[in-house]
Image: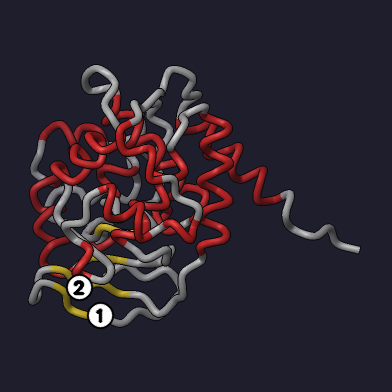
Amino acid sequence: MVRRGRRHVSAEHEGRRDGAATLELPDWPQLTRLARHTERFTAIPGLASFLIAKAKQVSNGIASAMHGGELGQTLFDAHRVDPAIEKRFAANPWWPSGDDDSLAERWTFLGGWFGLPPTFALATSDGAGLRHDPVTVFVPTFAVAYATDYVVRLARQTEPPMWSELWDRWSARLPSIGFPALRRKDSLADSLTRSLRRGADPKIVDQRVQTAEYPGFDAVARQLEVSELRLVPAAR
Protein backbone atom coordinates (compact mmCIF):
# COMPACT_ATOMS: atom_id res chain seq x y z
CA MET A 1 0.00 0.00 0.00
CA VAL A 2 1.29 3.48 -0.85
CA ARG A 3 2.11 5.71 2.10
CA ARG A 4 2.20 9.49 1.91
CA GLY A 5 2.41 10.64 5.46
CA ARG A 6 -1.13 9.58 6.41
CA ARG A 7 -2.63 6.52 8.01
CA HIS A 8 -4.93 4.34 5.97
CA VAL A 9 -7.31 1.54 6.83
CA SER A 10 -8.71 -1.04 4.44
CA ALA A 11 -12.39 -1.76 3.88
CA GLU A 12 -12.72 -4.67 1.49
CA HIS A 13 -14.96 -4.29 -1.57
CA GLU A 14 -15.74 -7.13 -3.96
CA GLY A 15 -14.26 -9.67 -1.58
CA ARG A 16 -10.49 -9.21 -1.57
CA ARG A 17 -10.20 -7.64 -5.01
CA ASP A 18 -10.52 -3.97 -4.13
CA GLY A 19 -9.14 -2.70 -0.83
CA ALA A 20 -10.48 0.87 -0.62
CA ALA A 21 -8.67 2.87 2.02
CA THR A 22 -8.91 6.32 3.57
CA LEU A 23 -9.45 8.05 6.91
CA GLU A 24 -10.28 11.43 5.42
CA LEU A 25 -13.54 13.25 4.75
CA PRO A 26 -14.79 14.54 1.39
CA ASP A 27 -13.67 17.99 0.26
CA TRP A 28 -16.40 18.91 -2.17
CA PRO A 29 -15.84 22.69 -1.99
CA GLN A 30 -12.25 22.36 -3.23
CA LEU A 31 -13.13 19.73 -5.81
CA THR A 32 -15.99 21.74 -7.30
CA ARG A 33 -13.92 24.95 -7.23
CA LEU A 34 -11.04 23.31 -9.11
CA ALA A 35 -13.34 21.52 -11.56
CA ARG A 36 -15.23 24.69 -12.46
CA HIS A 37 -12.03 26.70 -12.80
CA THR A 38 -10.65 24.02 -15.11
CA GLU A 39 -13.79 24.04 -17.25
CA ARG A 40 -13.45 27.80 -17.73
CA PHE A 41 -9.70 27.66 -18.41
CA THR A 42 -9.89 24.78 -20.90
CA ALA A 43 -13.13 25.89 -22.59
CA ILE A 44 -14.56 22.36 -22.29
CA PRO A 45 -18.28 22.87 -21.51
CA GLY A 46 -19.63 20.20 -19.17
CA LEU A 47 -16.21 19.18 -17.83
CA ALA A 48 -16.91 20.25 -14.25
CA SER A 49 -20.14 18.27 -14.06
CA PHE A 50 -18.42 15.20 -15.52
CA LEU A 51 -15.54 15.38 -13.04
CA ILE A 52 -17.89 15.90 -10.10
CA ALA A 53 -19.94 12.89 -11.20
CA LYS A 54 -16.84 10.70 -11.63
CA ALA A 55 -15.55 11.68 -8.19
CA LYS A 56 -18.96 10.92 -6.70
CA GLN A 57 -18.78 7.43 -8.16
CA VAL A 58 -15.22 6.36 -7.35
CA SER A 59 -14.09 8.39 -4.31
CA ASN A 60 -17.16 10.16 -2.88
CA GLY A 61 -15.11 13.36 -3.06
CA ILE A 62 -12.26 12.06 -0.87
CA ALA A 63 -8.88 13.08 -2.28
CA SER A 64 -6.98 10.25 -0.57
CA ALA A 65 -9.31 7.43 -1.63
CA MET A 66 -7.27 4.44 -2.75
CA HIS A 67 -8.41 1.23 -4.43
CA GLY A 68 -5.62 -1.28 -4.06
CA GLY A 69 -5.62 -4.89 -3.00
CA GLU A 70 -5.65 -7.59 -5.65
CA LEU A 71 -7.27 -5.25 -8.15
CA GLY A 72 -4.46 -2.69 -8.02
CA GLN A 73 -1.76 -5.33 -8.04
CA THR A 74 -3.22 -7.22 -11.00
CA LEU A 75 -3.60 -4.04 -13.04
CA PHE A 76 -0.02 -2.92 -12.44
CA ASP A 77 1.38 -6.39 -13.09
CA ALA A 78 -0.22 -6.22 -16.55
CA HIS A 79 1.06 -2.70 -17.18
CA ARG A 80 4.58 -3.50 -16.01
CA VAL A 81 5.11 -6.12 -18.71
CA ASP A 82 3.52 -4.03 -21.48
CA PRO A 83 6.44 -2.91 -23.71
CA ALA A 84 4.75 0.37 -24.66
CA ILE A 85 4.06 1.33 -21.04
CA GLU A 86 7.52 0.24 -19.92
CA LYS A 87 9.11 2.41 -22.61
CA ARG A 88 6.85 5.33 -21.72
CA PHE A 89 7.95 5.34 -18.09
CA ALA A 90 11.57 4.24 -18.55
CA ALA A 91 12.85 7.66 -17.45
CA ASN A 92 10.55 7.88 -14.42
CA PRO A 93 12.76 7.64 -11.30
CA TRP A 94 10.01 5.74 -9.45
CA TRP A 95 9.49 3.08 -12.12
CA PRO A 96 10.59 -0.40 -10.90
CA SER A 97 13.55 -1.71 -12.89
CA GLY A 98 14.27 -5.35 -13.60
CA ASP A 99 13.40 -7.63 -10.71
CA ASP A 100 13.57 -4.83 -8.14
CA ASP A 101 10.11 -4.57 -6.56
CA SER A 102 11.00 -1.95 -3.94
CA LEU A 103 9.17 0.78 -5.88
CA ALA A 104 6.30 -1.33 -7.23
CA GLU A 105 3.88 -0.51 -4.41
CA ARG A 106 3.89 3.13 -5.48
CA TRP A 107 2.00 2.03 -8.61
CA THR A 108 -0.34 -0.75 -7.43
CA PHE A 109 -3.54 1.20 -6.91
CA LEU A 110 -6.25 3.31 -8.49
CA GLY A 111 -6.53 6.47 -6.47
CA GLY A 112 -7.37 10.06 -5.82
CA TRP A 113 -10.62 11.86 -6.53
CA PHE A 114 -11.04 10.15 -9.92
CA GLY A 115 -9.76 6.63 -9.29
CA LEU A 116 -7.00 6.74 -11.90
CA PRO A 117 -4.07 4.31 -11.84
CA PRO A 118 -0.74 6.17 -12.06
CA THR A 119 0.10 4.52 -15.40
CA PHE A 120 -2.98 6.23 -16.88
CA ALA A 121 -2.83 9.51 -14.99
CA LEU A 122 0.85 10.28 -15.60
CA ALA A 123 0.71 9.42 -19.32
CA THR A 124 -0.31 12.97 -20.19
CA SER A 125 -0.71 13.99 -23.81
CA ASP A 126 2.11 16.56 -23.57
CA GLY A 127 4.48 14.16 -21.78
CA ALA A 128 4.80 16.50 -18.81
CA GLY A 129 3.57 13.91 -16.30
CA LEU A 130 5.78 11.01 -17.30
CA ARG A 131 8.44 11.66 -14.64
CA HIS A 132 6.03 12.48 -11.80
CA ASP A 133 5.90 10.53 -8.57
CA PRO A 134 2.84 8.23 -8.80
CA VAL A 135 1.44 9.53 -5.50
CA THR A 136 0.80 12.94 -7.07
CA VAL A 137 -2.58 11.49 -8.12
CA PHE A 138 -3.62 12.33 -4.54
CA VAL A 139 -2.67 16.02 -4.84
CA PRO A 140 -5.94 17.87 -5.61
CA THR A 141 -4.65 20.24 -8.31
CA PHE A 142 -2.78 17.45 -10.07
CA ALA A 143 -5.71 15.06 -9.72
CA VAL A 144 -7.98 17.45 -11.61
CA ALA A 145 -5.32 18.17 -14.24
CA TYR A 146 -4.63 14.46 -14.79
CA ALA A 147 -8.34 13.64 -15.07
CA THR A 148 -8.89 16.51 -17.51
CA ASP A 149 -6.07 15.32 -19.72
CA TYR A 150 -7.46 11.78 -19.63
CA VAL A 151 -10.88 13.12 -20.65
CA VAL A 152 -9.29 14.87 -23.63
CA ARG A 153 -7.32 11.77 -24.67
CA LEU A 154 -10.49 9.67 -24.58
CA ALA A 155 -12.50 12.29 -26.43
CA ARG A 156 -9.95 12.52 -29.25
CA GLN A 157 -9.88 8.80 -29.99
CA THR A 158 -12.66 9.25 -32.56
CA GLU A 159 -15.10 11.97 -33.55
CA PRO A 160 -16.23 14.03 -30.55
CA PRO A 161 -18.39 11.81 -28.32
CA MET A 162 -21.30 12.68 -26.10
CA TRP A 163 -20.39 12.96 -22.42
CA SER A 164 -22.32 9.73 -21.77
CA GLU A 165 -20.21 7.96 -24.41
CA LEU A 166 -17.01 9.31 -22.88
CA TRP A 167 -18.16 7.97 -19.49
CA ASP A 168 -18.56 4.55 -21.10
CA ARG A 169 -15.09 4.78 -22.69
CA TRP A 170 -13.59 5.60 -19.29
CA SER A 171 -15.42 2.66 -17.70
CA ALA A 172 -14.39 0.25 -20.46
CA ARG A 173 -10.66 0.95 -20.00
CA LEU A 174 -10.49 0.74 -16.22
CA PRO A 175 -11.49 -1.80 -13.58
CA SER A 176 -14.95 -1.30 -12.12
CA ILE A 177 -14.60 0.55 -8.80
CA GLY A 178 -16.91 2.48 -6.52
CA PHE A 179 -16.73 4.23 -3.18
CA PRO A 180 -18.91 2.85 -1.75
CA ALA A 181 -18.79 -0.29 -3.89
CA LEU A 182 -22.48 -0.15 -4.83
CA ARG A 183 -21.66 2.75 -7.20
CA ARG A 184 -19.36 0.64 -9.39
CA LYS A 185 -21.90 0.29 -12.20
CA ASP A 186 -23.37 3.81 -12.09
CA SER A 187 -24.01 5.43 -15.45
CA LEU A 188 -23.20 9.08 -16.00
CA ALA A 189 -26.89 9.91 -15.55
CA ASP A 190 -26.93 8.01 -12.25
CA SER A 191 -23.90 9.80 -10.91
CA LEU A 192 -25.04 13.23 -12.09
CA THR A 193 -28.32 12.67 -10.24
CA ARG A 194 -26.37 11.79 -7.09
CA SER A 195 -24.34 14.98 -7.59
CA LEU A 196 -27.11 17.55 -8.08
CA ARG A 197 -26.43 19.16 -4.72
CA ARG A 198 -22.82 19.67 -5.83
CA GLY A 199 -23.98 21.67 -8.85
CA ALA A 200 -23.67 18.94 -11.48
CA ASP A 201 -25.76 19.54 -14.60
CA PRO A 202 -27.68 16.43 -15.75
CA LYS A 203 -28.20 17.96 -19.19
CA ILE A 204 -24.58 17.29 -20.21
CA VAL A 205 -25.38 13.59 -20.83
CA ASP A 206 -26.27 14.17 -24.48
CA GLN A 207 -23.92 17.08 -25.14
CA ARG A 208 -20.78 16.62 -27.22
CA VAL A 209 -17.35 16.94 -25.64
CA GLN A 210 -15.49 19.94 -27.06
CA THR A 211 -11.71 19.90 -26.66
CA ALA A 212 -10.45 22.18 -29.46
CA GLU A 213 -9.21 24.85 -27.03
CA TYR A 214 -7.51 22.47 -24.57
CA PRO A 215 -4.12 24.05 -23.69
CA GLY A 216 -2.40 20.87 -22.44
CA PHE A 217 -1.81 19.21 -19.10
CA ASP A 218 1.12 21.35 -17.97
CA ALA A 219 -0.75 24.60 -18.59
CA VAL A 220 -3.77 23.33 -16.65
CA ALA A 221 -1.69 22.08 -13.72
CA ARG A 222 0.18 25.37 -13.46
CA GLN A 223 -3.03 27.39 -13.68
CA LEU A 224 -4.64 25.37 -10.88
CA GLU A 225 -1.59 25.69 -8.67
CA VAL A 226 -1.63 29.48 -9.11
CA SER A 227 -5.38 29.68 -8.49
CA GLU A 228 -5.04 27.79 -5.22
CA LEU A 229 -2.06 29.85 -4.05
CA ARG A 230 -4.17 32.99 -4.44
CA LEU A 231 -6.49 31.61 -1.78
CA VAL A 232 -3.68 31.36 0.79
CA PRO A 233 -3.76 34.40 3.13
CA ALA A 234 -0.67 36.57 2.84
CA ALA A 235 1.68 36.55 5.84
CA ARG A 236 1.59 39.69 7.98
Residue at the spot 29% in from the left edge and 27% down from the top edge: 155
Count of numbered tags: 2
Residue at the spot 19% in from the left edge and 69% down from the top edge: 182
Question: Picture coordinates of residue 136 (x, y %)?
Answer: 43, 53
Q: Mark 2 Cα within 10 Å, few/some/many (few <14, many 20+)?
A: many
Q: Of residues 47 and 1, which is closer to you in this image?
A: 47
Residue 65, quarter of the rendered image: bottom left
Q: Of residues 206 and 3, which is closer to you in this image?
A: 206
Q: How far apart are marks 2 and 1 (CA)?
A: 6 Å
The quarter of the rendered structure image containing the C terminus is bottom right
The quarter of the rendered structure image containing the N terminus is bottom left
Question: Picture coordinates of residue 100 (x, y %)?
Answer: 17, 57
Residue 129, quarter of the rendered image: top left
Q: In this view, does 75 lie to the left or right of 63?
A: left
Up-down relation of residue 209 to residue 129 (above or below): above
Circle 2: residue type: Gly
- Say whether residue 112 is visible: no
Q: Of residues 46 and 141, which is closer to you in this image?
A: 46
Residue at the spot 10% in from the left edge and 39% down from the top edge: 82
Residue at the disc numbered 1: 10
- Say whether residue 20 is visible: yes
Residue at the disc numbered 2: 19
Q: Are marks 2 and 1 in contact (CB under 8 Å)?
A: yes
Up-down relation of residue 67 to residue 162 (above or below): below
Residue found at the far right of this picture: 236
Q: Mark 1 Cα within 10 Å, few/some/many (few <14, many 20+)?
A: some
SS category of the residue bearing label 2 = strand
Circle 1: residue type: Ser
SS category of the residue bearing label 1 = strand
Q: Of residues 2 and 230, which is closer to you in this image?
A: 230
Question: Picture coordinates of residue 116 (x, y %)?
Answer: 29, 51
Up-down relation of residue 79 to residue 71 (above or below): above
